[in-house]
Amino acid sequence: MLFAPAAFNLAETSRMIEIAKGVRADPVAREAFSVRFISEGGDFEELIESNGFEVERVAPRLTPEKIAHVLAVNDEEKFAPAYSKKEMIAKVAGDLAAVDRLKPDVVVTGSYLSMPLTCRLRGIPLVWAVQSTWLPDFFATGAGTTDTVKPRWFKRLVDAVLYPVFRSWMWFGFIHSVNQAAGHYGAKTFSPVLTFFQGDTTLVAEPPGFSDVALPDAHFPIGALLPEQQFTMPVEVEQIPNDFPLVYFAMGSSGVGHIVKELIESFRGKPYRVVAPVRSLLAGQDVAVPDNVTVTDWLPALEMNKRADIALIHGGIGTVLTAALAGKPVVGIGMQPEQVANISCLVEKGFARRVAKSRNSRKMVAAVHDALSTLLSDEDARRAAVEYAASIQDWADGSTRAARTLVDRYGSTRGDIPRSARNGR
């Protein structure tokens, strides 16, 4: 079983590690599969190895500049393709050399962009780990951005206008170069665009009912994939006084640096203390960190959420479900459509507020502090957060369900692999 994370993204890498740990911990899965990882580069390759897994490093390697470009496209900071046709062809060539050497029976990915085409070319079954906010039905109904539009007929009209916009963004930024590479290699292209995210098996990394999207065939809800014991709590966090409400400000590894800087500086003089594991996002910037803000490297996120009174997050599925499992209100600033959609799912549950990402930083910062102030004094929101947390505790361990699903689907012999996968669907 070959795991293919985008190792420059902490949340994505952590999800792959947690599934692999579930396979390793389950006696039947451990007997069925040996586990390897593949990576084209990124800061979190060492995290994979520190969890006891081998990493096959493939060429061409992603440079820091290329990783920054891909993240900027993903966060809508740049309107450009993440990869050129030439780059994607080279990426697929590197993948093919690796899979021909390793001969995996199944590949698991979450956002390794060239791997779906690589699997199609070699007839290897592909497992996606996604969330329902990646699925076509969610984008077709506004991706959470039109929930407040009234009346219903006008919402449907707005949704119909937005859907091609979402698809065009995904096609131009990510899928077009993959389809160009598919043409180069003589393979079937991914059309419609969002079929790119449909594996032979799809692990939906969220609890049932997180969104109102009905899951298609071969989509299996597994619950949250949250990292366990990867990081320790810094001494400076342990020493924070308990004199004001505590805000946990987390933007993952893909948050936009200038937005993080503006928010950090805006906490000066505010009536709360802030813990912000955003040091890597502030690199290279001159930031005036206020006395009531503690900036750190990565933290044990679930434990930190439980200590905090409220979470201010970017809306990645990991940050959203960590806050939800901790039973804390959420203020979310999505950097891109999927994150906006994830936050909207908590808004619908009554304990979150969504703030639009904006180039008008003064307006955005004011909206963030208004939302924080409102939620910190909202007893109904706190009660809704606690009640939702209690309702999903049985879905906190997605790694175990993922391992069992993979055993059920692929754990016997290659002859049991779905025919569609062997035919390179």
Image (cartoon, rainbow, N blue to C red):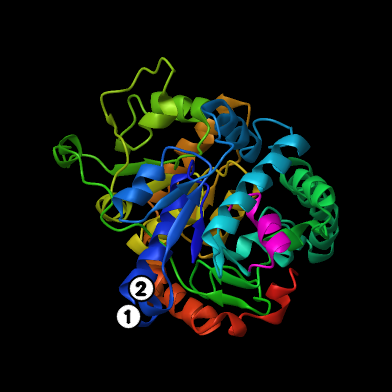
Q: Quadrant of the C terminus?
A: bottom right
* Mark 1 or mark 2: whose residue is earlier in sequence: 1
Q: Say few, some or many: other residues with alpha carbon within 10 Å of mark 2 (under 14 / 14 to 19 / 20 or more).
A: some
Q: Quadrant of residue 142?
A: bottom right
Q: Amino acid at mark 2?
A: Gln
Residue 393 badge: 2
Q: Is residue 417 above or below residue 84?
A: below
Q: What residue range appears in magenta?
A: 110-124
Q: Nearer the viewer, residue 265 or 232?
A: 232
Q: Nearer the viewer, residue 216 or 268?
A: 216
- Going 64% across and 52% down the picture, which residue do you hit? 96
Residue 340 badge: none
Q: Position of residue 232 (x, y in %)?
A: 21, 46
Query: Could you tell me which secondary element the residue under label 2 belongs to?
Result: helix
- Closer to viewer: mark 1 or mark 2: 1
Label 1 close to label 2 by CB (< 8 Å) = no
Residue placed under numbered mark 1 in the picture = 27
- Going 56% across and 30% down the picture, which residue do you hit? 68
- Going 33% across and 61% down the picture, which residue do you hit? 326
Q: Position of residue 230 (x, y in %)?
A: 28, 51
Q: Is residue 122 magenta?
A: yes
Q: Is residue 203 left or right of residue 278?
A: right
Q: Position of residue 267 (x, y in %)?
A: 37, 29
The alpha-carbon separation of the residues under discs 1 and 2 comes to 24 Å
- Is any atom of residue 235 visible in this view? yes
Q: Position of residue 308 (x, y in %)?
A: 29, 49
Q: Is residue 11 magenta?
A: no
- Is any atom of residue 373 visible in this view? no
Q: Amino acid at mark 1?
A: Pro
